Each structure stands twice: as structure tokens, then as C-alpha cells.
Amino acid sequence: MDYKQAGVDIEEGYKAVEKYRDLAAGTMNRAVINDIGSFAGMFSLKELIEAGKGMSAPVLVSGTDGVGTKLDIAFKMKKYDTVGIDCVAMCVNDVLCHGAKPLFFLDYLACGKLDAGIAADMVKGVAVGCRETGSVLLGGETAEMPGFYDEGKYDIAGFSVGIVDRAAIVDGKAIKDGDVLVGVASSGPHSNGFSLIRKVITDLNEDFGGMPIGRALLEPTRLYVKPILSLMEKIEVKGMAHITGGGFYENIPRMFATPHTAMIKDNSWKIPPIFARIAYGMATASGTGAVPAGLTGAAAQAEGEKILGADAELRTKLFNTFNMGIGFVLALDPKHADKAIADLDAQGFPAWKIGRVIPYDAKSATTHGGKAPGAGDVRFER
């Protein structure tokens, strides 16, 4: 028996690396001093210092994440070229929350049986995400592990490294009561909540606005790096939150250095239709018979809209799981809010005033998602 008979095809791996090399080439800059295929990626310290030019104390900021079970929908829809964007976005958007500009990214791809074409499609998305955020795709790893991963299944994760001046780190210390919370539109569920979505939406070919709902669910996570960094050159941004797993309740308080309450104005933005469809699925999956079962397409979506307006408990669960149409939140001085919204809109990123910062009261604090009183909280008002 040889390695190929054991399930690892070295030749397929070589094909994949050749495809990766071409994809990564489009993200390179003069800071990179070696090529894909080396044992490690090299990013010149000289250019790193140049990246921090004008900074009194450059700080490296890193973040790591994966795509999660959204991958299962990609496998079933046989569409692999967007999940790589998700992988980059989940990392660089986190790094951005502290005001850092991404420098480079590395990915990790694992599978049971390697198909160079599928792997290249996934890395193609990574390269797109890197180019759109000014990140170098510095390297990565592809692991073929037969018997560990099912054939046809892939996992992808990665990490980003960025840079920011210590004096310019966004850490929430400047946030004060009365500041405005500006929400920036998401493109859908992004890469969170898919373990639930896969339970409540089982027919991925169901019609959703003229396309299979599976395709709608694969819409990649928005990349907020360029518009937010551009905005930060014009106004002070006091705090930022990337709305990922845990939704509003867990992520917005993470921007606070000291306890505050984020008072969110209900209905201050239009919740995208996909979340109404998810709401309908959650309601029918409960088995209570409170809503009509068996609806699909526009009928299911319409029923979901009613549920969002009538079922406060289910609405809370949704906001504790999904971004509900707001993928990124900024804390700003009220005098800057309108300018920020206009600037983001002009860059193709719709934004709204979604709330305000108010004094924190531990006695009335919410504890959704296991957040202990004292960490800050989120409340909603009509």
C-alpha cells in the first residue's frame, strides 16, 4: 500500500498549490519576499515599519476565525467560491474593531479527499477577500485527512494580522452616555447561526425572491475594512462591534471599556427578508401549532414578518443569534452621526442611527447569551 491507496493524493495536492499560487499572486506587494509553496510566508520587517510610518508606537493586531456550518450549504449547492470571502471577512472585520488595517492573511483548508478544483474555488474566495481589504494572502495549509473528514466535506479557517498606532487603538474608553450607535447593513446572516438555519430551512431549492434560498444563504459576509478605515480618517470613531455569533446581545457590549447600556431603537432599519423566513422556520419547528405549517416561498416569508412583529420571545432569540441586518456597529459623538451615515451610504454601505448609549443599571441589565451583569448590556425601545 502507498500513500495514495491510503487516501492521500499528493499529485492532487500539487495541482491545488499551483492554483493557489496564481490566486495569491494577485494579493502580493513588495513586503512579501518569498512565494507560495515555501515552508512559511515572509513579510518584510522593513515594509512592516513602512506600514506603521507616522505611528508613534505601531501595534500588531490579530484575529482568527472560520466559516462554520455554512460550509454544509456550500457543499449541497456545489458553490464553493464565496465561503473563502466569509473566512477572510470574519477575521478582518474583527481586527478592524480596534482600528487596525489588515496586512496579511493565512488560511487553513482541511478535507477528506482533495479535489484541486474545489479547493481552488474556496481559495479563490480567500484571494477576493484579501484583495478587497488590502491584505496579502501570505500562505496557508491544505490538509487531506481521509477517514477523519467525510469525502466531499471541507473545512476552512484563517487568521489576519493588522497594524494600528497605539494612540489610535479603538478600545471603547472614549464612549460616553449620549453617544449615537450607527448600524451598517449586513448582506444576510453572514457566517453565523447556520447550525440553526440548517435545521429550520431544509429545502435549499425553495424559491426566495426568484432564486434558490440556498444561494441567498451563501451571500458572503460583508467586508467593512475599506469604508470604515476611510471614515476614520474623517471623524472620530469611539467604538466598533462586529455582529457575529451571539447577535446584538453578546457583541455590542464588547465595544464598551466600562459598563454602558446600548438602547436600540426598534424598527430603525428594515430587517432583511431572509430573517423573516428564518423566523417562520423557527416558529414552526417549535411544534406548538401556533403558526400554519408547510408554507414555502413568499407565503413563508410573509408569515415570518408577522411573527417578527408579534412574538417578542422569538424576536429576542433571533437578535441573540443573528445580525438581523446590521453587520457592524459604530459608537459616535452625536454631531458626527449624520456625516458618518452619508459617507458610508456614498461608499455603498447603507447605515442608520439604530440607538444610543445610556447609563448602565446592573439591576435591570439583560443577561442574554450568558453575559453577566457588569459587562454592559443591550435593551430595545419602541
Image: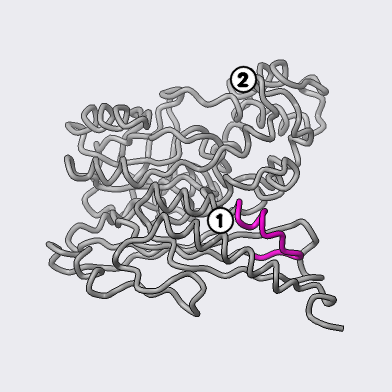
Instruction: Specify which label sits upstream in the sequence, 2 or 1.
Output: 1
Local SS, label 1? helix
Horizontal side of residue 313 vs 41, given as left or right:
right
User: Percent from the top left, x then y, of residue 241?
Assistant: 39, 47
Is residue 200 a member of the stretch shown in magenta? no
**Residue at the outermost right position:** 1
Residue neighbourhood size for the residue with mark 2, other residues' Cα within 10 Å, grouped as few (<14), some (14–19), many (≥20): some
Local SS, label 2? helix
Question: Looking at the image, which residue is at 29% across and 65% down?
Answer: 30
Is residue 112 a member of the stretch shown in magenta? yes
Dividing the picture into quadrants, the one containing residue 59 is bottom left
| 32 or 241, nearer to the observer | 32
Tell me which amino acid carries mark 1.
Val
User: Percent from the top left, x then y, of residue 201?
Assistant: 74, 35
Looking at the rendering, the stretch of residues picked out in magenta corresponds to 110-121
Residue on which the image places disc 2: 305
Dividing the picture into quadrants, the one containing residue 168 is bottom left
Tell me which amino acid carries mark 2.
Glu
Question: Looking at the image, which residue is at 66% across and 30% down?
Answer: 279
Separation (CA) of disc 2 from disc 1: 37 Å
User: Percent from the top left, x then y, of residue 43?
Assistant: 34, 72
Is any atom of residue 132 visible in this view? yes
Residue on which the image places disc 1: 123
Give the foreground label among 2 and 1: 1
If the image is split into quadrants, where does the N terminus sit? Answer: bottom right
Q: Given contact means CB atoms under 8 Å apart, are the residues at marks 2 and 1 in contact?
A: no
In this picture, is 29 found above or below 333?
A: below
Horizontal side of residue 45 vs 149, given as left or right:
left
Residue neighbourhood size for the residue with mark 1, other residues' Cα within 10 Å, grouped as few (<14), some (14–19), many (≥20): many
